[in-house]
Amino acid sequence: MTNGLLELFTIFVLAGFVGYEVISKVPSILHTPLMSGSNAIHGVVVVGSMIVLGSAHTGAEEALGFIAVVLGTLNVVGGFVVTDRMLQMFKSRQPTPKGGQGAKGDEGGGS
């Protein structure tokens, strides 16, 4: 049992190192498409966790399944929020109207 747990932990740590190295080499222009792709993958993860939650038999399985659904949903929503904010950076800004409204301290009065 301990050897199996050690093997799984080793794979987890190695996957973390590989993931960090791969993501750190990605140019910033590609972050938005990668975020969109990862959001789609996380959507599949949420559906899978809901299926597993539906087949839970004990209270512990139901609790873990519920936590998986909630955390997966938060991950998807957070990913879409970040992607939307990144896409807002690329939109052109509307020019401010000239005339009609002055600067905040320009309304009459003397010194």
Image: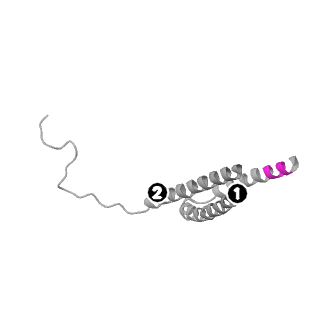
- Disc 1 or 2, which lies upstream in sequence? 1
Give the class, few, some or many, for how many residues have Cα within 10 Å of label 2's Cα (few <14, many ≥20).
Answer: few
Q: What stretch is highlighted in magenta?
A: 4-9
The extreme top residue here reads: 111
In the image: residue 71, left or right of residue 81: right
Is 8 one of the magenta-colored residues?
Answer: yes
Disc 1 crowd rating (10 Å Cα; few below 14, some 14-19, many 20+) is: some
| Position of 59 relative to 31 (above/below) | above
Is the image coloured rainbow, by chain, by secondary structure, or in one colour?
one colour
Q: Residue 1 carries which label?
A: none
Helix, strand or loop under label 1: loop
Q: Mark 1 points at which residue?
A: 56
User: Which residue matches tag 2?
Assistant: 85
The residue drawn where x is 27% and y is 57% is 96
Label 1–label 2 contact, CB within 8 A: no
Residue 64 % position (x, y): 67, 51
The amino acid at mark 1 is Ala
Circle 2: residue type: Arg
Q: Which residue is drawn at 61% across and 56% down?
A: 69
Residue at image coords 87%, 49% = 1
Apparent side of residue 97 relative to residue 2 in the rendered image (left or right): left
Secondary structure of the magenta portion, mostly?
helix
Where is residue 62 drawn, in percent x and y? Answer: 67, 53
Label 2: state its secondary structure: helix
CA–CA distance between discs 1 and 2? Answer: 37 Å
Quadrant of the rendered image containing residue 68: bottom right
Residue 89 or residue 25, whichever sits in front: 89
Image position, residue 30 (x, y; %): 56, 63
